[in-house]
Amino acid sequence: MLGQQGPRIAALVVVGILAALLALQVRERLRETRERLITERREPQAVVVSAFLNLSRVARDWAKWSELQNFVLHSDPGFVPTNVEPASVLENGAVMAVVRDDGRLLFSRGSDGHERPLHLSLLACASPNLAGLRDRRTVRMLACRTGGVDYIGVATRGTDSAISVAA
């Protein structure tokens, strides 16, 4: 009787081992899937954070410049074509705008060198955040949606190169 059950026992042992291996494989696949999903969620966030950091650096660099301050205070008509339009800061769809404290737009330029309705839509999105910029060293991150378009950007106050006088 034991001789006839030998193959059955061996088959049960094999099935038990295969079931254990399958369970380990399923558990490993679930762990890999969980890690992949966590990574996939973090990647877009990392891209946005990196964009904010890069935009903050550029905004601080431009805003803390005496030439820009002079433009804001004295409206030099040669400033934008000489300094802004040829700048690499406007590559890859970036837009630069300078807005006075009273909300008046001094200029807005994108990579095409022109002011467009899209730029004005961006300003409408950013405007509510501009009033809160009091400290000359602060850079405010902006993320908003206007007219079905998502924008990310930064805003900071203009000042002279020594960061001593606000524009």
Image (spheres, rainbow, N blue to C red):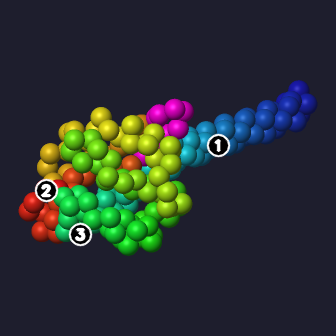
Q: Residue furthest top?
A: 1
Is 151 inside the magenta-drawn segment? yes
Query: Where is residue 7 drawn, in percent x and y?
Result: 88, 36
In the image, what residue type sits under mark 3? Glu
In the image, what residue type sits under mark 1? Arg
- Going by the image, does 148 lie left or right of 61? right
Looking at the image, which residue is at 45% across and 71% down?
Answer: 86
Looking at the image, which residue is at 34% across and 69% down?
Answer: 78
* Residue that label 1 marks: 29
Mark 2 falls on what kind of element? loop
Residue 166 numbered mark, or none: 2
Q: Residues within 10 Å of mark 2 (few under 14, many from 20)?
A: some
Between disc 3 and disc 1, the foreground one is 3
Residue 67 numbered mark, or none: 3
Judge whether residue 93 can be spotted in this image: yes
Looking at the image, which residue is at 85% across and 31% down?
Answer: 8
Q: Residues within 10 Å of mark 1 (few under 14, many from 20)?
A: few
